[in-house]
Amino acid sequence: MKFLACLRLTALCLTLLSSNLVIAQIPKSLDSLETYVQTHPPTDTNYVNALLRLGNLTTKTKANYDRADSLLRVAEKVASKLNFGRGIYQANTFLGSNYYLLGRGQQTLEYLQKALAIAEANKLSPRILANAMTNLGTAYRNLNQQEKALDISLRSLRMQEQYNIQPRNENTYMGIGHALKETKRPREAIGYFQQALVLNRNLKYPYGMAISEQNIGRCYDDLDQYDKALAYYRIAGKHAKESESELLQADILVNTGLVLRKSKRLEEAKRSIEQALVLNKKQESKGAMATDYFNLGQVYEELKDYKLAEQNMKKALALANELKDNTKIAIYTQGLADVYGGMKDFQQAYVFQLERNQRMDSTTTVRTSAEVQRMVAKYETEKKEAQIKLLQQQAKLNQQERERIQFRTNVFIAGSVLLLLLGASVSAWLLNRSRFQRLEEAQKLRKQIAHDLHDEVGSTLSSISILSGHTDTLLRQNRPGMDTSETAQRLVQKIYTDARQILESIDEIIWTINPGNDSLHRIALRLQEYAQPLMESKGVECSFQIDPALGDAPISMEVRRSLYLIGKEAINNLIKYSGATQATVRFERKNDQLQVMIQDNGRGFDPAQLSERTGQSSMKQRAEAMGGSLDVQSAPGQGTRLQLVINP
């Protein structure tokens, strides 16, 4: 939930840009500005500037986006008639800011690209051009195009340095800091946020100081340094009050509450989120109110006050349904299922869990049985990962013990499912054909997990056992004239390598079966996490591009696993054999198809001469099993291009 508060807070930085363009004689308060625009004719640039300031303040202090949008469009029209380039530029900038706050990323990008083009066409000052680049960086970040965001923000900073623009635009430093934070480099980001803070202090601008301090706090939060995060949040809160921005105060209070919750200071967390809720009610911001109610519900859940947790989460769900926000609806529905589980009301827990699954996968409900198993295990044993732990234990037990535990597990699952069905008064499900299909799918999932553990872990464990015994024998013999220590050292190194391989294999198996990873976007992020350290270790400059259109589109476990293994094999081949210095990995969605492209500038090869070491035949078989196709284009000395196309 912190993401929503951070999104709104980041967008607020955008509304500050170019405010210095407004002529000083224009009123500053909302009421006086309303009077000014109603009593002055739309015949000069002062009228345009008054409309721009009024639209900006309407967004910042009232969060009335429709009213602000109307004012800014009138300002753009009048500025165009007057051929007032700065006014046209600023109107598009503030329109982009409004769309950012409303969560419309593509429209935000279009308006801010238009603003930059207007600034360049009208040959506006270097300061305005630098501001426009900074704004555009914010739009790119919103679409998760972090490389573009960082590139254009650095261009803005270089322009400011080239023309010695003073004072520097603090939002440029903020943009660079945000891009670094989003790419999991919070320590580097802190330095840029601190530079923005210094600039805002010099300007004696409490609103900007509050935003800078809040972002520093968020970085310390990411680093799990909660005391430092709280210190910055509290200072930011004081400056937000000075700026009289209730919207900003609410953002800071929410983040404060979330950190207090992580620190297990639950009563303080509750008070902080309640204060944010009061402010958001005044602003009539339903999306923010929904977030506050849900966060309060989670705090009450940790306090074991399940009734209040239920009440708050129901309010959050009602607002999300009113807003038709499917992402929030899925999250809040899962939250209610967890609360009812804590209350031991398994009938309601089952109902909400089933609803959540139906929303996450509208085409099939075969995962319902597996989710029920996960839920029962959690609520009866109070261990969220009981099934995974059970499978890990099975890998260490002998065959007879595994069969006994499997039998007991099946009896427990069958009994628990029966109890849920009886409690829910749906005994008819026992005779329903779809129930047997779901049970069959759950059994298939367990067999797949067991098969993966046997293939990936069993043989390696046997190898470790044999090597350990041999190493022990060598060390006990210690015969004169034999270099046993060197041999033992090699065996120990082999044991270490095999153990790491087991850990990686188990990690991949757990990631594969986790329903939370059932989306194209999560697969792309997983491959990026796998590829980046390998690329850096070999000095390969890698551009990793993820199409925002991927979103959180669901995908089956089998397709997700095959897609990940193909990408992993291709990346390994690139690292081992290509000798490349540059590589590009792109995930994009076109015409309801997922297209994955991996390209390098390496030495290339002749595709007609298939090599088992590159695993091309295996990758193509996996692609065909998914109903897709794999195309490999390469030639000696011309690099390699691999393209995978599937219908997810």
Image (tube, rainbow, N blue to C red):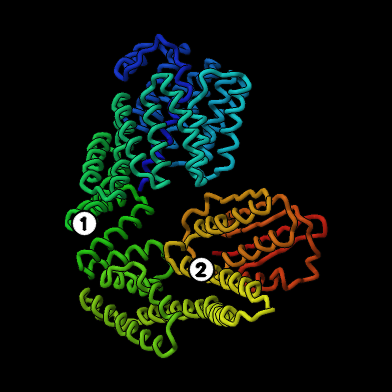
Snapshot quadrant of residue 356:
bottom left
Viewer-nearest residue: 330 or 133 = 133
Viewer-nearest residue: 322 or 211 = 211
Disc 1 and disc 2: Cα gap in Å?
39 Å
Outermost residue toward the bottom in this view:
400
Where residue 349 appears, as percent x and y from the top left, is 26, 66
Q: Which of marks 1 and 2 is in front?
A: 2
Q: In this view, does 462 lie to the left or right of 244?
A: right
Dot 1 crowding, Cα within 10 Å, few <14, some 14–19, many 20+: many
Q: Is residue 472 left or right of residue 371?
A: right
Where residue 635 appears, as percent x and y from the top left, is 81, 60
At x 52%, y 76%, the residue is: 457
Q: For mark 2, what is the residue? A: 503
Residue 466: tell me if it is visible. no
Where 249 falls versus 31 (above or below)? below
**Element type at marker 2?**
helix
Quarter of the image with the C terminus is bottom right
Residue 499: tell me if it is visible. yes
Q: Is residue 193 left or right of residue 120?
A: left
Where 78 falls versus 24 (above or below)? below
Where residue 108 appears, as percent x and y from the top left, is 49, 37
Viewer-nearest residue: 317 or 295 = 295
Where 411 falls versus 25 (above or below)? below
Callout 1 amino acid: Glu
What label does residue 527 carry, if any?
Answer: none
Where 364 falls versus 396 (above or below)? above
Where residue 410 appears, as percent x and y from the top left, is 34, 83
Callout 2 amino acid: Leu
